[in-house]
Amino acid sequence: MTSRIVVLLSGSGSNLQALIDACAEEDYGVDIVAVGADRDGIGGLDRAHKANIPTFVHRVRDFADREAWDQAMAEAVSAYRPDLVVSAGFLKLLGKRFLEAFPGRYVNTHNSLLPAFPGMNGPAEALAAGVKVAGATLFICDAGVDTGPIIAQTTVPVLDGDTVDDLTERIKVAERRQLVQAVGDMLRHGWDVEGKRVTIRSGS
């Protein structure tokens, strides 16, 4: 049985494209049933249209307040009955109503080795701190900023002479690979969350 995911994004959609490519493989066992965004005119929506994936756009400014937007996002995603919701570069924090609609089923990918360097500037902060290893983290979203239970992490070296752009791109390559692998494993085998620990079940 094929599993269903909804992908949320705000930008060019490179992580979405990695998932689209994976879903084209029969043994991946996952369908992207919708792509949602918080803005129009972005590359991620173009990628979805090219792949014939339904899309929706809910801009925060089109709603009376953030709670109304959060409720609309929850309703829009719920209509597609996803097994998992994937934030793939979605730059808005979703609130209580959304999180309650998808407990333990809304995941996000971040370009640092959490809990180090949360927020918008992970690679720049990693360089400034002089770390020798950076990477990406896939985690289950909670009410905090990049604070949820960690599903998977992948590392990349920080090289002498790296710029922020150099390191960011190296992380992105590893991040896409991890996202595809972990989402597939979660949906094929299942997963458990106990406190801050996430365990992907072993395949039979």
Image: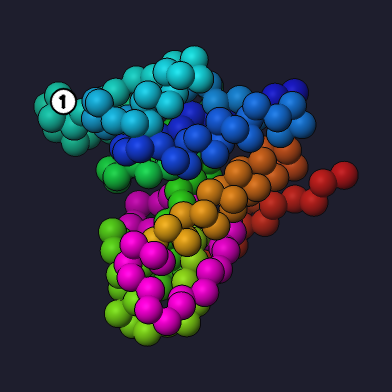
Q: Which residues are magenta?
A: 139-167
**Which residue appears at 75% of the width and 42% of the height?**
189
Q: Position of residue 10 (x, y in %)?
A: 31, 37
Quadrant of image for the C terminus = top right
Please determine whether, in this image, residue 143 is positioned above or below residue 79. Answer: below
For this rendering, which residue is in front, 8 or 176? Answer: 176
Name the residue beneath numbered marker 1. 63
Q: Is residue 47 left or right of residue 2?
A: left
Q: Is residue 165 magenta?
A: yes
Q: Is residue 200 left or right of residue 42?
A: right
From this viewpoint, which residue is outermost toward the front?
Answer: 161
Q: Is residue 133 magenta?
A: no
> Across the whole image, how many numbered discs are drawn on residues?
1
For this rendering, which residue is in front, 170 or 62? Answer: 170
Q: Position of residue 12 (x, y in %)?
A: 35, 37
Q: Secondary structure at mark 1?
A: loop
Please determine whether, in this image, residue 68 is positioned above or below residue 164. Answer: above
The amino acid type found where label 1 is placed reads Phe
Q: Quadrant of residue 148?
A: bottom left
Quadrant of image for the N terminus = top right
Q: Position of residue 38 (x, y in %)?
A: 27, 32
Q: Position of residue 195 (x, y in %)?
A: 55, 61
For this rendering, which residue is in front, 92 or 17? Answer: 17
Q: Is residue 74 visible?
A: no
Please determine whether, in this image, residue 134 is positioned above or below residue 93. Answer: below
From this viewpoint, which residue is outermost toward the right?
Answer: 204
Please determine whether, in this image, residue 195 is positioned above or below residue 133. Answer: above
